[in-house]
Image: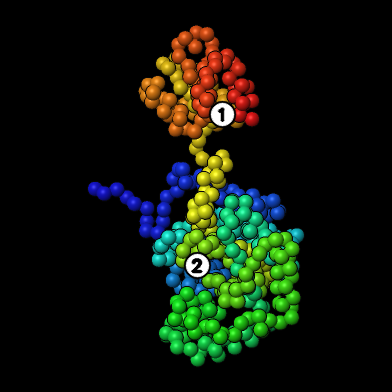
Amino acid sequence: MSTFQAPKGTFDLIPPRSAVFLAVREAMAETVRRAGYGYVETPAFEDTALFKRGVGESSDIVTKEMYTFTTRGGVSLTLRPEGTASVVRAALQHNLHKGALPVKLYYSGSYYRYEQPQAGRYRHFSQVGAEALGTEDPAVDAELIILAADAFKQLGLTKVRLLLNTLGDQECRPRYRAALQEFLRGLDLDEATRARIEINPLRVLDDKRPEVQAQLTDAPVIGDYLCDACKAFHEEVQTLLSIYGVPFEDDVKLVRGLDYYTRTTFEFVHDGLGSQSAVGGGGRYDGLSQDLGGPSLPSVGWALGVDRTVLAMEAEGVAHSAAGAGFGQSVDVFGVPLGAAAKAMLFGLVVELRRAGVRADLVFGDKGLKGAMKAADRSGAKYALVAGDRDLAADVVQLKDLTTGEQTPVAVDQIVPTLKEKLS
Ligand code: AMP
Protein backbone atom coordinates (compact mmCIF):
# COMPACT_ATOMS: atom_id res chain seq x y z
CA MET A 1 0.00 0.00 0.00
CA SER A 2 1.41 3.41 -0.88
CA THR A 3 1.57 6.04 1.84
CA PHE A 4 -0.40 9.27 1.78
CA GLN A 5 0.91 12.50 0.27
CA ALA A 6 -0.10 16.08 1.09
CA PRO A 7 -2.83 17.19 -1.39
CA LYS A 8 -1.80 18.76 -4.70
CA GLY A 9 -0.78 22.40 -4.36
CA THR A 10 0.01 22.11 -0.64
CA PHE A 11 3.21 21.42 1.26
CA ASP A 12 4.24 20.57 4.79
CA LEU A 13 6.35 22.90 6.87
CA ILE A 14 9.04 20.86 8.55
CA PRO A 15 12.25 21.69 10.43
CA PRO A 16 14.60 23.35 9.78
CA ARG A 17 12.75 25.43 7.14
CA SER A 18 9.66 25.81 9.31
CA ALA A 19 11.70 28.07 11.62
CA VAL A 20 12.07 30.60 8.81
CA PHE A 21 8.28 30.70 8.39
CA LEU A 22 7.80 31.35 12.09
CA ALA A 23 10.45 34.08 12.05
CA VAL A 24 8.81 35.75 9.04
CA ARG A 25 5.32 35.67 10.56
CA GLU A 26 6.64 37.04 13.82
CA ALA A 27 8.66 39.83 12.17
CA MET A 28 5.61 40.94 10.16
CA ALA A 29 3.31 40.75 13.19
CA GLU A 30 5.69 42.57 15.50
CA THR A 31 6.09 45.35 12.94
CA VAL A 32 2.36 46.13 12.99
CA ARG A 33 1.87 45.54 16.73
CA ARG A 34 4.47 48.25 17.23
CA ALA A 35 2.12 50.56 15.31
CA GLY A 36 -0.91 49.78 17.46
CA TYR A 37 -2.55 47.01 15.41
CA GLY A 38 -4.38 44.38 17.52
CA TYR A 39 -4.61 40.68 16.70
CA VAL A 40 -7.85 39.38 15.18
CA GLU A 41 -8.57 35.73 14.38
CA THR A 42 -11.59 34.73 12.36
CA PRO A 43 -12.80 31.25 11.32
CA ALA A 44 -11.12 29.48 8.42
CA PHE A 45 -14.53 29.30 6.71
CA GLU A 46 -17.35 31.78 6.30
CA ASP A 47 -20.71 32.03 4.58
CA THR A 48 -20.06 31.75 0.85
CA ALA A 49 -22.09 34.92 0.28
CA LEU A 50 -19.60 36.97 2.31
CA PHE A 51 -16.82 36.33 -0.21
CA LYS A 52 -19.13 36.61 -3.21
CA ARG A 53 -20.21 40.05 -2.08
CA GLY A 54 -16.93 41.05 -0.48
CA VAL A 55 -14.35 39.89 -3.01
CA GLY A 56 -16.65 40.44 -6.00
CA GLU A 57 -18.73 38.20 -8.25
CA SER A 58 -16.52 38.87 -11.27
CA SER A 59 -13.15 38.25 -9.61
CA ASP A 60 -11.11 35.16 -10.50
CA ILE A 61 -11.19 34.19 -6.84
CA VAL A 62 -14.97 33.93 -6.72
CA THR A 63 -15.54 32.55 -10.21
CA LYS A 64 -12.78 29.93 -10.23
CA GLU A 65 -10.81 29.57 -7.03
CA MET A 66 -13.05 29.08 -4.02
CA TYR A 67 -13.27 25.89 -1.97
CA THR A 68 -17.01 25.86 -1.40
CA PHE A 69 -18.96 23.11 0.33
CA THR A 70 -22.43 22.51 1.70
CA THR A 71 -22.67 21.51 5.34
CA ARG A 72 -24.82 18.65 6.59
CA GLY A 73 -27.21 21.40 7.67
CA GLY A 74 -27.51 22.62 4.07
CA VAL A 75 -25.49 25.84 4.51
CA SER A 76 -22.99 26.91 1.86
CA LEU A 77 -19.60 27.71 3.39
CA THR A 78 -16.28 28.61 1.76
CA LEU A 79 -12.72 28.23 2.99
CA ARG A 80 -11.41 31.78 3.22
CA PRO A 81 -9.54 32.80 0.05
CA GLU A 82 -8.38 36.09 1.62
CA GLY A 83 -8.62 37.95 4.91
CA THR A 84 -10.17 41.37 4.41
CA ALA A 85 -13.84 40.40 3.98
CA SER A 86 -13.71 38.30 7.17
CA VAL A 87 -12.04 41.06 9.18
CA VAL A 88 -14.60 43.66 8.08
CA ARG A 89 -17.40 41.17 8.82
CA ALA A 90 -15.99 40.60 12.33
CA ALA A 91 -15.51 44.33 13.01
CA LEU A 92 -19.13 45.03 12.02
CA GLN A 93 -20.47 42.04 13.96
CA HIS A 94 -18.73 43.19 17.15
CA ASN A 95 -19.44 46.89 16.61
CA LEU A 96 -15.74 47.75 16.68
CA HIS A 97 -16.47 50.58 14.26
CA LYS A 98 -18.59 52.29 16.92
CA GLY A 99 -15.53 52.82 19.11
CA ALA A 100 -12.41 54.85 18.40
CA LEU A 101 -11.40 55.05 14.75
CA PRO A 102 -9.45 53.82 12.98
CA VAL A 103 -9.90 50.24 14.15
CA LYS A 104 -6.44 48.76 13.58
CA LEU A 105 -6.34 44.98 13.25
CA TYR A 106 -3.84 42.38 12.06
CA TYR A 107 -4.12 38.68 11.34
CA SER A 108 -1.95 35.73 10.48
CA GLY A 109 -3.19 32.47 9.07
CA SER A 110 -3.92 30.03 6.25
CA TYR A 111 -5.80 30.91 3.08
CA TYR A 112 -7.17 28.64 0.37
CA ARG A 113 -7.51 29.11 -3.37
CA TYR A 114 -8.08 26.46 -6.00
CA GLU A 115 -5.29 27.69 -8.29
CA GLN A 116 -3.07 25.95 -10.84
CA PRO A 117 -0.13 25.10 -8.57
CA GLN A 118 3.34 26.26 -9.57
CA ALA A 119 6.44 27.62 -7.83
CA GLY A 120 5.20 30.24 -5.35
CA ARG A 121 1.53 29.58 -6.08
CA TYR A 122 -0.21 27.13 -3.81
CA ARG A 123 -3.73 26.04 -2.94
CA HIS A 124 -3.02 26.48 0.73
CA PHE A 125 -0.83 29.45 1.64
CA SER A 126 -0.10 31.72 4.52
CA GLN A 127 -0.58 35.47 4.91
CA VAL A 128 -0.05 38.13 7.53
CA GLY A 129 -2.46 41.00 6.99
CA ALA A 130 -3.19 44.39 8.52
CA GLU A 131 -6.28 46.57 8.14
CA ALA A 132 -7.10 50.09 9.35
CA LEU A 133 -10.87 50.55 9.33
CA GLY A 134 -12.81 53.79 9.47
CA THR A 135 -10.59 56.58 8.26
CA GLU A 136 -10.08 58.43 5.02
CA ASP A 137 -6.72 59.84 6.11
CA PRO A 138 -4.04 59.25 3.43
CA ALA A 139 -1.48 59.11 6.27
CA VAL A 140 -2.91 55.69 7.18
CA ASP A 141 -2.33 54.42 3.64
CA ALA A 142 1.25 55.68 3.94
CA GLU A 143 1.64 54.18 7.43
CA LEU A 144 0.64 50.72 6.22
CA ILE A 145 2.88 50.84 3.16
CA ILE A 146 5.83 52.02 5.27
CA LEU A 147 5.22 49.22 7.79
CA ALA A 148 5.21 46.56 5.08
CA ALA A 149 8.36 47.97 3.49
CA ASP A 150 10.04 48.04 6.91
CA ALA A 151 9.03 44.43 7.61
CA PHE A 152 10.62 43.24 4.35
CA LYS A 153 13.73 45.27 5.10
CA GLN A 154 13.97 43.91 8.63
CA LEU A 155 13.88 40.38 7.22
CA GLY A 156 17.01 41.25 5.26
CA LEU A 157 15.35 41.61 1.85
CA THR A 158 16.90 44.24 -0.40
CA LYS A 159 15.23 43.43 -3.73
CA VAL A 160 11.59 44.20 -2.94
CA ARG A 161 10.04 46.86 -5.18
CA LEU A 162 6.85 48.77 -4.44
CA LEU A 163 4.38 49.37 -7.27
CA LEU A 164 1.82 52.08 -6.59
CA ASN A 165 -1.38 53.20 -8.27
CA THR A 166 -4.71 54.79 -7.51
CA LEU A 167 -8.04 53.59 -8.84
CA GLY A 168 -10.05 56.75 -8.16
CA ASP A 169 -13.39 56.75 -6.37
CA GLN A 170 -17.15 56.69 -7.08
CA GLU A 171 -16.89 60.10 -8.65
CA CYS A 172 -14.05 59.71 -11.12
CA ARG A 173 -13.75 55.96 -11.64
CA PRO A 174 -17.03 55.65 -13.65
CA ARG A 175 -15.72 58.17 -16.20
CA TYR A 176 -12.47 56.28 -16.51
CA ARG A 177 -14.29 52.97 -16.68
CA ALA A 178 -16.43 54.20 -19.58
CA ALA A 179 -13.40 55.52 -21.48
CA LEU A 180 -11.53 52.28 -20.91
CA GLN A 181 -14.50 50.19 -22.04
CA GLU A 182 -14.76 52.17 -25.24
CA PHE A 183 -11.05 51.64 -25.94
CA LEU A 184 -11.16 47.92 -25.10
CA ARG A 185 -14.21 47.23 -27.27
CA GLY A 186 -12.12 48.25 -30.28
CA LEU A 187 -9.43 45.61 -29.63
CA ASP A 188 -8.99 42.09 -30.96
CA LEU A 189 -9.84 40.00 -27.89
CA ASP A 190 -11.28 36.55 -27.19
CA GLU A 191 -14.86 36.12 -26.03
CA ALA A 192 -14.14 35.70 -22.31
CA THR A 193 -12.09 38.88 -22.28
CA ARG A 194 -14.79 40.74 -24.21
CA ALA A 195 -17.28 39.68 -21.56
CA ARG A 196 -14.91 40.99 -18.88
CA ILE A 197 -14.89 44.42 -20.57
CA GLU A 198 -18.56 44.76 -19.70
CA ILE A 199 -18.32 43.43 -16.12
CA ASN A 200 -14.97 44.70 -14.84
CA PRO A 201 -12.91 46.39 -17.56
CA LEU A 202 -10.07 47.36 -15.18
CA ARG A 203 -9.27 43.68 -14.79
CA VAL A 204 -8.40 43.46 -18.49
CA LEU A 205 -5.43 45.73 -17.75
CA ASP A 206 -4.20 42.98 -15.42
CA ASP A 207 -4.22 40.34 -18.19
CA LYS A 208 -0.76 38.81 -18.28
CA ARG A 209 -0.87 37.48 -21.87
CA PRO A 210 1.63 39.30 -24.13
CA GLU A 211 -0.84 39.46 -27.06
CA VAL A 212 -3.26 41.33 -24.80
CA GLN A 213 -0.61 43.54 -23.20
CA ALA A 214 0.67 44.52 -26.67
CA GLN A 215 -2.71 46.04 -27.46
CA LEU A 216 -2.90 47.99 -24.22
CA THR A 217 -0.03 50.43 -24.75
CA ASP A 218 -2.37 53.27 -25.71
CA ALA A 219 -5.10 52.45 -23.19
CA PRO A 220 -6.46 55.44 -21.27
CA VAL A 221 -4.80 55.79 -17.87
CA ILE A 222 -6.58 56.54 -14.61
CA GLY A 223 -4.30 59.50 -13.86
CA ASP A 224 -5.93 61.51 -16.64
CA TYR A 225 -9.39 60.99 -15.16
CA LEU A 226 -8.85 61.48 -11.41
CA CYS A 227 -11.06 63.99 -9.60
CA ASP A 228 -9.28 66.67 -7.57
CA ALA A 229 -9.95 64.92 -4.26
CA CYS A 230 -8.44 61.63 -5.47
CA LYS A 231 -5.48 63.43 -7.01
CA ALA A 232 -4.74 65.30 -3.75
CA PHE A 233 -5.16 62.09 -1.75
CA HIS A 234 -2.71 60.21 -3.95
CA GLU A 235 -0.16 63.01 -3.87
CA GLU A 236 -0.28 63.02 -0.07
CA VAL A 237 0.43 59.27 0.04
CA GLN A 238 3.31 59.69 -2.42
CA THR A 239 4.75 62.62 -0.47
CA LEU A 240 4.77 60.70 2.81
CA LEU A 241 6.43 57.68 1.19
CA SER A 242 9.13 59.92 -0.27
CA ILE A 243 9.78 61.73 3.02
CA TYR A 244 10.18 58.45 4.88
CA GLY A 245 12.45 56.83 2.35
CA VAL A 246 10.15 54.26 0.75
CA PRO A 247 10.81 54.30 -3.00
CA PHE A 248 7.88 53.44 -5.28
CA GLU A 249 7.21 53.00 -8.96
CA ASP A 250 4.00 54.35 -10.46
CA ASP A 251 2.21 51.51 -12.19
CA VAL A 252 -0.92 52.78 -13.90
CA LYS A 253 -1.98 49.26 -14.84
CA LEU A 254 -1.90 47.92 -11.30
CA VAL A 255 -5.50 46.96 -10.55
CA ARG A 256 -5.11 43.79 -8.45
CA GLY A 257 -7.34 40.77 -8.45
CA LEU A 258 -10.02 41.73 -5.97
CA ASP A 259 -12.97 43.92 -6.88
CA TYR A 260 -13.25 45.99 -3.74
CA TYR A 261 -10.35 48.42 -4.14
CA THR A 262 -10.72 52.22 -4.44
CA ARG A 263 -8.05 54.93 -4.55
CA THR A 264 -4.66 53.62 -3.28
CA THR A 265 -3.56 50.21 -4.58
CA PHE A 266 -0.09 48.76 -4.27
CA GLU A 267 1.90 45.62 -4.67
CA PHE A 268 5.31 44.58 -3.40
CA VAL A 269 7.20 42.47 -5.93
CA HIS A 270 10.47 40.57 -5.73
CA ASP A 271 12.54 39.98 -8.84
CA GLY A 272 14.03 36.69 -7.68
CA LEU A 273 10.72 34.80 -7.78
CA GLY A 274 9.91 34.27 -11.46
CA SER A 275 6.32 34.75 -12.59
CA GLN A 276 4.73 34.67 -9.11
CA SER A 277 6.60 37.78 -8.04
CA ALA A 278 4.11 39.49 -5.69
CA VAL A 279 5.17 39.14 -2.08
CA GLY A 280 2.36 41.33 -0.81
CA GLY A 281 -0.29 43.77 -1.81
CA GLY A 282 -3.22 45.81 -0.71
CA GLY A 283 -5.05 49.05 -0.98
CA ARG A 284 -7.98 51.16 0.05
CA TYR A 285 -11.48 49.71 0.03
CA ASP A 286 -13.82 52.54 0.97
CA GLY A 287 -16.97 50.77 -0.22
CA LEU A 288 -16.50 47.27 1.19
CA SER A 289 -18.31 47.79 4.49
CA GLN A 290 -21.38 49.06 2.66
CA ASP A 291 -21.16 46.16 0.19
CA LEU A 292 -21.41 43.89 3.25
CA GLY A 293 -24.47 45.71 4.60
CA GLY A 294 -22.57 47.93 7.06
CA PRO A 295 -22.22 51.70 7.35
CA SER A 296 -19.71 53.76 5.39
CA LEU A 297 -16.30 52.72 6.71
CA PRO A 298 -13.44 53.93 4.51
CA SER A 299 -10.54 51.56 5.11
CA VAL A 300 -7.16 50.43 3.87
CA GLY A 301 -5.11 47.29 4.35
CA TRP A 302 -2.61 44.81 3.00
CA ALA A 303 -1.77 41.13 3.04
CA LEU A 304 1.79 39.86 2.82
CA GLY A 305 2.49 36.38 1.51
CA VAL A 306 4.55 34.43 4.03
CA ASP A 307 5.42 31.58 1.63
CA ARG A 308 6.70 33.88 -1.10
CA THR A 309 8.55 36.06 1.39
CA VAL A 310 10.43 32.94 2.52
CA LEU A 311 11.17 32.06 -1.13
CA ALA A 312 12.43 35.62 -1.67
CA MET A 313 14.68 35.35 1.40
CA GLU A 314 16.04 32.05 0.13
CA ALA A 315 16.67 33.65 -3.27
CA GLU A 316 18.62 36.47 -1.58
CA GLY A 317 20.44 34.06 0.73
CA VAL A 318 19.11 35.67 3.93
CA ALA A 319 16.73 32.96 5.15
CA HIS A 320 19.39 31.40 7.33
CA SER A 321 19.79 34.41 9.63
CA ALA A 322 16.03 34.62 10.24
CA ALA A 323 15.92 30.95 11.21
CA GLY A 324 18.62 31.58 13.77
CA ALA A 325 16.45 34.10 15.59
CA GLY A 326 15.25 31.62 18.21
CA PHE A 327 12.51 29.92 16.18
CA GLY A 328 14.43 26.76 15.36
CA GLN A 329 14.89 23.62 17.41
CA SER A 330 18.53 24.19 18.26
CA VAL A 331 19.42 24.30 21.96
CA ASP A 332 22.29 25.88 23.88
CA VAL A 333 23.03 23.03 26.26
CA PHE A 334 23.01 19.27 25.68
CA GLY A 335 23.27 16.52 28.30
CA VAL A 336 25.56 13.53 27.67
CA PRO A 337 25.10 10.94 30.47
CA LEU A 338 27.42 7.96 30.87
CA GLY A 339 25.21 5.41 32.61
CA ALA A 340 21.74 5.22 34.10
CA ALA A 341 22.40 7.17 37.31
CA ALA A 342 24.00 10.05 35.37
CA LYS A 343 21.06 10.00 32.96
CA ALA A 344 18.59 10.48 35.82
CA MET A 345 20.65 13.36 37.23
CA LEU A 346 21.13 15.11 33.86
CA PHE A 347 17.44 14.70 33.04
CA GLY A 348 16.68 16.67 36.20
CA LEU A 349 19.30 19.32 35.39
CA VAL A 350 17.88 19.78 31.90
CA VAL A 351 14.37 20.23 33.35
CA GLU A 352 15.77 22.87 35.74
CA LEU A 353 17.68 24.64 32.97
CA ARG A 354 14.54 24.85 30.83
CA ARG A 355 12.56 26.23 33.76
CA ALA A 356 15.28 28.85 34.15
CA GLY A 357 14.81 29.84 30.50
CA VAL A 358 17.79 28.01 29.00
CA ARG A 359 17.27 26.01 25.81
CA ALA A 360 18.43 22.52 26.77
CA ASP A 361 18.08 18.92 25.63
CA LEU A 362 19.74 15.59 26.33
CA VAL A 363 20.33 12.32 24.61
CA PHE A 364 17.53 9.75 24.71
CA GLY A 365 17.82 6.03 24.13
CA ASP A 366 20.97 3.99 24.47
CA LYS A 367 23.44 5.70 22.12
CA GLY A 368 26.82 5.25 23.84
CA LEU A 369 29.32 8.08 24.33
CA LYS A 370 30.12 8.51 20.62
CA GLY A 371 26.47 8.61 19.59
CA ALA A 372 25.65 11.00 22.41
CA MET A 373 28.45 13.42 21.44
CA LYS A 374 27.25 13.30 17.84
CA ALA A 375 23.73 14.17 19.03
CA ALA A 376 25.19 17.04 21.07
CA ASP A 377 26.94 18.41 17.96
CA ARG A 378 23.81 18.04 15.87
CA SER A 379 21.71 19.87 18.48
CA GLY A 380 23.59 23.11 17.83
CA ALA A 381 24.50 23.34 21.54
CA LYS A 382 27.39 25.50 22.66
CA TYR A 383 27.88 23.47 25.83
CA ALA A 384 27.62 19.79 26.70
CA LEU A 385 27.03 18.51 30.21
CA VAL A 386 28.95 15.25 30.50
CA ALA A 387 28.58 13.08 33.61
CA GLY A 388 29.55 9.54 34.66
CA ASP A 389 29.61 7.64 37.95
CA ARG A 390 32.83 9.31 39.11
CA ASP A 391 31.32 12.76 38.57
CA LEU A 392 28.20 11.74 40.47
CA ALA A 393 30.32 10.63 43.39
CA ALA A 394 32.08 14.03 43.41
CA ASP A 395 28.79 15.86 42.93
CA VAL A 396 30.06 17.57 39.76
CA VAL A 397 29.26 17.67 36.05
CA GLN A 398 31.85 18.19 33.32
CA LEU A 399 30.94 21.39 31.46
CA LYS A 400 32.33 21.05 27.96
CA ASP A 401 32.61 24.05 25.66
CA LEU A 402 31.83 22.46 22.30
CA THR A 403 33.52 25.25 20.35
CA THR A 404 36.90 25.11 22.10
CA GLY A 405 36.71 21.54 23.41
CA GLU A 406 37.68 22.83 26.85
CA GLN A 407 36.20 20.87 29.75
CA THR A 408 35.86 21.89 33.43
CA PRO A 409 34.13 20.26 36.40
CA VAL A 410 31.31 22.39 37.87
CA ALA A 411 29.40 21.62 41.10
CA VAL A 412 25.92 20.31 40.27
CA ASP A 413 24.16 23.09 42.17
CA GLN A 414 26.20 25.70 40.26
CA ILE A 415 25.28 24.44 36.77
CA VAL A 416 22.15 26.55 36.28
CA PRO A 417 23.68 29.89 37.43
CA THR A 418 26.96 29.17 35.60
CA LEU A 419 25.21 28.45 32.30
CA LYS A 420 22.78 31.34 32.67
CA GLU A 421 25.73 33.66 33.01
CA LYS A 422 27.73 32.13 30.17
CA LEU A 423 24.75 32.32 27.83
CA SER A 424 23.59 35.83 28.73
P1 AMP B 1 -3.71 38.83 -2.73
O1 AMP B 1 -4.79 38.75 -1.69
O2 AMP B 1 -3.98 37.98 -3.92
O3 AMP B 1 -3.28 40.21 -3.05
O4 AMP B 1 -2.46 38.15 -2.03
C1 AMP B 1 -1.59 38.81 -1.15
C2 AMP B 1 -0.29 38.06 -1.13
O5 AMP B 1 -0.52 36.71 -0.73
C3 AMP B 1 0.35 37.94 -2.50
O6 AMP B 1 1.16 39.06 -2.77
C4 AMP B 1 1.16 36.67 -2.38
O7 AMP B 1 2.40 36.95 -1.76
C5 AMP B 1 0.32 35.84 -1.45
N1 AMP B 1 -0.48 34.85 -2.22
C6 AMP B 1 -1.66 35.04 -2.83
N2 AMP B 1 -2.08 33.91 -3.42
C7 AMP B 1 -1.14 32.98 -3.20
C8 AMP B 1 -0.99 31.60 -3.55
N3 AMP B 1 -1.90 30.95 -4.25
N4 AMP B 1 0.13 30.95 -3.14
C9 AMP B 1 1.08 31.60 -2.40
N5 AMP B 1 0.98 32.89 -2.04
C10 AMP B 1 -0.10 33.57 -2.44
Residue at (52%, 18%) from the top-left corner?
A: 407
Q: Cβ(mark 2) to ligand 1 < 8 Å?
A: no
- Residue extending farthest to the left is 1
Visible residue check, residue 215: yes
* Label 2–label 1 contact, CB within 8 A: no
**Image coordinates for residue 306, horizontal then vertical, percent:** 53, 55
Visible residue check, residue 112: no
**Image coordinates for residue 19, horizontal then vertical, percent:** 51, 44
Residue at (59%, 56%) from the top-left corner?
A: 158
Q: 341 or 331, which lies in front? A: 331
Q: Earlier in the sequence, mark 2 or mark 1?
A: 2
From mark 2 to mark 1, how far is it between C-alphas?
46 Å
**Image coordinates for residue 181, horizontal then vertical, percent:** 55, 87
Few, some or many residues within 10 Å of mark 1 (<14, 14–19, 20+): some
Specify the quadrant of the image occupied by residue 153: bottom right
Q: 177 or 209, which lies in front? A: 209
Q: From what the image shows, is residue 414 above or below residue 191? A: above
Which SS class for mark 2?
helix
Residue 48's tag is 2
Query: Which residue is denoted by mark 1 in the rendering?
Result: 354
Specify the quadrant of the image occupied by residue 245: bottom right
Residue 208's tag is none
Q: How many marks?
A: 2
Q: From what the image shows, is residue 337 above or below residue 19? A: above
Q: From what the image shows, is residue 292 above or below residue 24? A: below
